[in-house]
Amino acid sequence: MNFKNRIETLSRIKSDLFQKDFLLTWQKSESDLQMILEVASILKELRRQNISSKIFDSGLAVSIFRDKSTRTRFSFASAANLLGLEVQDMDEEKSQVSHGETVRETANMISFFSDFIGIRDDIFLGEGHKYMLEVGEALDEGYEKGVLPTRPGIVNLQCDRDHPTQSMSDLLHLKQHFGSLDELRGKKIVMSWAYSPSYGKPLSVPQGIIALMSRFGMNIELAFPEGYDLIPEIVEIAKVNAKNSGGSFSVSHSMEDAVKDADIVYPKSWAPFHIMQQRTELLKIGDKKGLADLEHTCLAENSRFKHWEYNEDIMRLTKKQNAFFMHCLPADISGVSCKEGEVSAAVFEKYRIATYHEAGFKPYIIAAMMFANRFKDPAQMLHYLLDRNRKRVEST
Amino acid sequence: MNFKNRIETLSRIKSDLFQKDFLLTWQKSESDLQMILEVASILKELRRQNISSKIFDSGLAVSIFRDKSTRTRFSFASAANLLGLEVQDMDEEKSQVSHGETVRETANMISFFSDFIGIRDDIFLGEGHKYMLEVGEALDEGYEKGVLPTRPGIVNLQCDRDHPTQSMSDLLHLKQHFGSLDELRGKKIVMSWAYSPSYGKPLSVPQGIIALMSRFGMNIELAFPEGYDLIPEIVEIAKVNAKNSGGSFSVSHSMEDAVKDADIVYPKSWAPFHIMQQRTELLKIGDKKGLADLEHTCLAENSRFKHWEYNEDIMRLTKKQNAFFMHCLPADISGVSCKEGEVSAAVFEKYRIATYHEAGFKPYIIAAMMFANRFKDPAQMLHYLLDRNRKRVEST
Amino acid sequence: MNFKNRIETLSRIKSDLFQKDFLLTWQKSESDLQMILEVASILKELRRQNISSKIFDSGLAVSIFRDKSTRTRFSFASAANLLGLEVQDMDEEKSQVSHGETVRETANMISFFSDFIGIRDDIFLGEGHKYMLEVGEALDEGYEKGVLPTRPGIVNLQCDRDHPTQSMSDLLHLKQHFGSLDELRGKKIVMSWAYSPSYGKPLSVPQGIIALMSRFGMNIELAFPEGYDLIPEIVEIAKVNAKNSGGSFSVSHSMEDAVKDADIVYPKSWAPFHIMQQRTELLKIGDKKGLADLEHTCLAENSRFKHWEYNEDIMRLTKKQNAFFMHCLPADISGVSCKEGEVSAAVFEKYRIATYHEAGFKPYIIAAMMFANRFKDPAQMLHYLLDRNRKRVEST
């Protein structure tokens, strides 16, 4: 990588990320998104060349997770560590949605030394994004009133609506695979439901993918069995995006039809929107019997669609029988991690290493979000790091 | 802030904090306490001005908590991080009091690389402080025998007797609010019991407040319903302190009488001393039935004092109807965090941001305790940091 | 310590530790082992002299523990911190053995920013070492395919076969006590079973001790009640080692016979090999009834050997009635941590501080394993650190 050229390119991108939270990709301009991709790529290369990106001498990055997570937790911790922040976990009660006073106060109490707060809250439909906004307002107040020395930036590590660190990693993966964002124009990507022996999986990945990929002139095909709808207003956003960017958006209820001429397939199980709504209501009132019944019904319903598996027969229908396969991991792999799942063992194995690479962008995407939040001119700061040339690992 | 002047002032304070544990404020001289306040203020300002206070290149700060804590945990982690130490949590079994061999050995096993140990142990009356002394003795032995390369300092993050990081934060808050420690002379502070729908709350906050504020010529009014006594010997300490410092100390069983002419009110629920004693005995023998019965009796007893709520009627009785309100947070706010609580929503809202500021001193108080424990001449080291002028966050 | 001389000595040791995992001592040459001991000693002295050994500017050290551990966790965290890495814990499900796809994927997902992975997996006989090999293969693949920027090194923090960080600490302790490795030649060490009121204790400590100490010309006496065998192939390794190094190896079923003329005694409870095999099978199928029955039988069997206690009568039978006592801690001390245990209170007290010193080598042994894994020429890098002369704690 020619750093100077890359940073030069970067310096011409006009973005509006400074001191802004990163919650939903559709609230960001194309320039903002390009900025994140570029900074992420440069940070990745800096590390590969053993050049330190440590910009904080001390400071905390707080992680708030409403459910257990290994991958996202490590990605966040890695990003924080790369920049010099120490992660402190804040464990919210799993089944409890904090609101109002509690959020307002706690947000301040954990932020006296915090530079970033990463939040993952995808269990309750209608809650995750709202919660992040509430935290943001509390931090605004705390900063304005002089309680907090800096306004910590919020990074959405997955909410009920979007999963921007995932979708941006996926976009960077596609950019790298096809050569440039321009090369994505006119490419057909199938965001597809697929069978899984579990239920209640969040909608944020498919929603994030259709809302983001539609920004770059791609042809989006959203495929799912009838009834497995996503949140309608986010589908609407994807439609508008596609129109504005010169791409297209369509929905299909046949996997076979959907994958025809596909350049990219992204199978992923999710729960129907209306089920997630019911589930949220039941969780709120703590109705265990109702939840068990709902799970039973849904698993039975799911099992009608076991043929929604990405196997070699399906892949043969794609462009040149060779569509690029993506997954956010972990995948439900038939005969490996479950009896019947989202993808056959043979298809997954072919793309296994590619999906690892895909996942490997996430720490850098998160670090880039932090970087662009903190510095008005990221290009200048990257220049500084390059000139500083501090080694990540000492050598003689 | 004129750093040079402040540090110059600091250099004239003769303190005896070097390599000493900070367990109880009443074991420290007024100069010691002033030193902590000053160092905390300077560290806070250094951070605000983006000047690094990192004095450790590596090293651990161990936290031992006998119960769950978000605020204190974050304060300790923040202080450690500010100075360059990494926090390692040591989770003791909740309901088990370790003694003798176990404490002696464990204290050494966790200290090979530790510079500080922060302990919160406030559940068992008669145990918390004793436990800290035991840990301290074990560390003394380990250091003397060459097992440990340094003698880690102990910071009391709350015990059964005192809560010095809280009371010192509160004192710094008062100092800042009224302008100086001298301005506190003759001010009336009401440390008052207040109703809460829970039971078994520790006594360390009210005890810490009366024992500390009585050092600076304040008029202490301790108010509680009959039967809700604190540990007698600590009340005695407060009395003596008040006498020595030219202040006063009195007890009242009427909230209305107590708050008359009050400059400051500090409402806080606590459990009666003799109940905590009973509870400790029951916890020690693991008598669940006994504990349930005790809780039942106490909640019934508590509910007789629901009128001990700090609302606008009560506040109107204070000096100029405008006493300064303090709380260690989280408060039980009527109609917000509970049905009936320590403080009305209107009164709390008026002082909400002030209580956030109050809490915001704690990380710096803890950092100051560490700083003064580690350096014989804190003024000189602060001078060094100022001259070093390393940025906390890089900038170009 | 004369650093220059020590490092000069070190530079003449030819080792093959660079970019190699440290899983089993018997896969390492004597030079490798000497290198670890030397680097550990120098790192310990550097810290004592307040000279920083920080060689990483950022990066993670991941800890994977299948059971709770305070000591090993702190040792690993300390080592990582000393070198500049931040620990991230990865909590595996306790009772679940991950294999194949899950291990392969997870190993990569946690390693994008990791420099080391420390694994403790000693519950299932036949699984721990295998699991580490699987993780290693997954990391090899990830590194080769460009998924990982560096190949994280694996440190065995205890498996079913060996406990190299323990045995190497013990060896360094012996080296220090007797003056040199050469002084260990001809010394008699008794690795002895001892009674404990619990069951299912792992075999890795006694196995690690007999397999390592037999490398240095010591006379190994393995003592246990009939039926309490170790894994036969590791006993075989110890025999061959003893023969090759000019020492000896023998087994005794009488504690009294074993300790005759002993220079060193190392009592430690463990479960019989065949019991651990049965237990592993029962754990795998989750047979709770079977596990309870097995525990019952074993405790009854154990109680037949309560006289296997290291008390003053036994110690009087050793060389000059004064054998050196070792223990990996925590010990089951009769009348202190249990009614009847591995060692009497009087004997333990005599050697208590010595066992603390023994434990204190572990963080440095781990750090040395990391150091030698990362730098082709550890001597050169230690030279660099000495010349850099950065203070661990600032001073004016």
Image (cartoon, coloured by chain):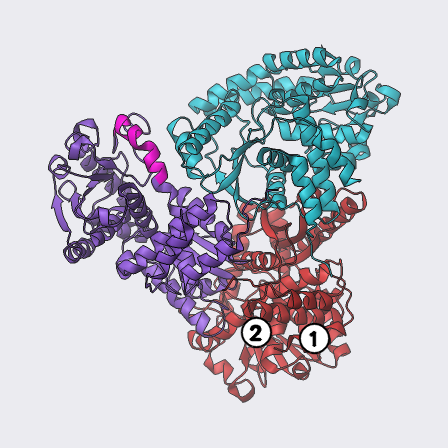
Chain colours: A red, B cyan, C purple
Mark 1 element type:
helix
Nearer to me, A159 or A286:
A159
Name the chain letter of the residue that bears numbered label 2: A
Residue A9: which disc?
A: none
Residue C346 is one of the magenta-drawn residues: yes
| Magenta part of the chain | C344-357
Q: What residue is drawn where x is 52% and y is 62%? A: A393
Label located before the other in sequence (1 or 2): 1
Badge 1 amino acid? Ser
**Residue B326 visible from this viewpoint:** yes
Q: What residue is drawn where x is 57% and y is 81%? A: A259
The quadrant in which residue B169 appears is: top right
Nearer to me, A365 or A382:
A382
Above-or-below relation of C115 to A356: above
Badge 2 amino acid? Tyr
Name the chain letter of the residue that bears numbered label 1: A
Nearer to me, C159 or A118:
C159
- Residue C75 % position (x, y): 42, 46
- Residue C191 % position (x, y): 21, 43
Dots 1, 2 in contact, CB < 8 A:
no
Residue A214: which disc?
A: 1
Label 1: how many residues lie within 10 Å, few (<14), some (14-19) or many (20+)? many
Q: Alpha-carbon distance for marks 1 and 2? A: 14 Å
Above-or-below relation of B282 to B179: above
Mark 2 element type:
strand
Q: Residues at marks 1 and 2, common chain?
A: yes
Residue A266: which disc?
A: 2
The quadrant in which residue C225 appears is: top left
